[in-house]
């Protein structure tokens, strides 16, 4: 997609967060040991996602990237 629309000055990037501490994941943390498969051994927080999105939005030359959190 990034290659297809770059000629029209459109950037295409993706933020793909993993497990983030929210009400929805609260039950998951209690019943499973998901942190054992996460390199930092902890869930992210919403602020982590917000910072990644701000970085992508403020990068006018970056295109075709996937930021996995």
Image: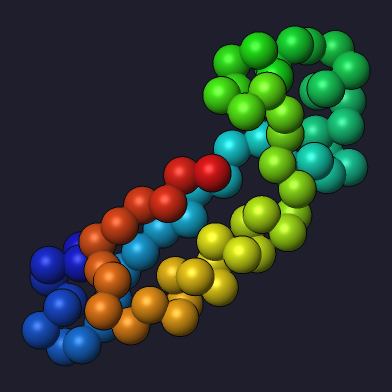
Give the vertical position of 41 relative to 4 (above or below): above
Among the 4 quarters of the image, the one containing residue 47: bottom right
Quadrant for the N terminus in the image: bottom left
Quadrant for the C terminus in the image: top right
- Comparing 22 with 36, the one in front is 36
Q: Is residue 61 left or right of residue 46?
A: left
Among the 4 quarters of the image, the one containing residue 41: top right
Percent across and percent down for residue 61 are 26, 79
Q: Is residue 17 left or right of residue 68?
A: right
Percent across and percent down for residue 5 are 17, 77
Residue at (10% x, 84% y) in the render: 7
Residue at (75% x, 48% y) in the render: 45
Give the vertical position of 55 relative to 24 (above or below): below
Q: Is residue 51 left or right of residue 68?
A: right
**Residue most extreme to the bottom:** 8
Residue at (20% x, 67% y) in the render: 2
Among the 4 quarters of the image, the one containing residue 3: bottom left
Give the vertical position of 56 relative to 37 (above or below): below
């Amino acid at each position: 997609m990034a290659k297809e629309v770059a000629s029209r000055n459109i950037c295409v990037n993706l933020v793909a967060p993993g497990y983030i501490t929210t009400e929805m994941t609260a039950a998951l943390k209690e019943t499973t040991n998901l942190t054992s498969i996460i390199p930092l051994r902890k869930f992210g927080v919403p602020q982590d996602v917000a910072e990644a999105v701000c970085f992508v939005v403020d990068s006018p030359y970056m295109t075709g990237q996937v930021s996995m959190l």
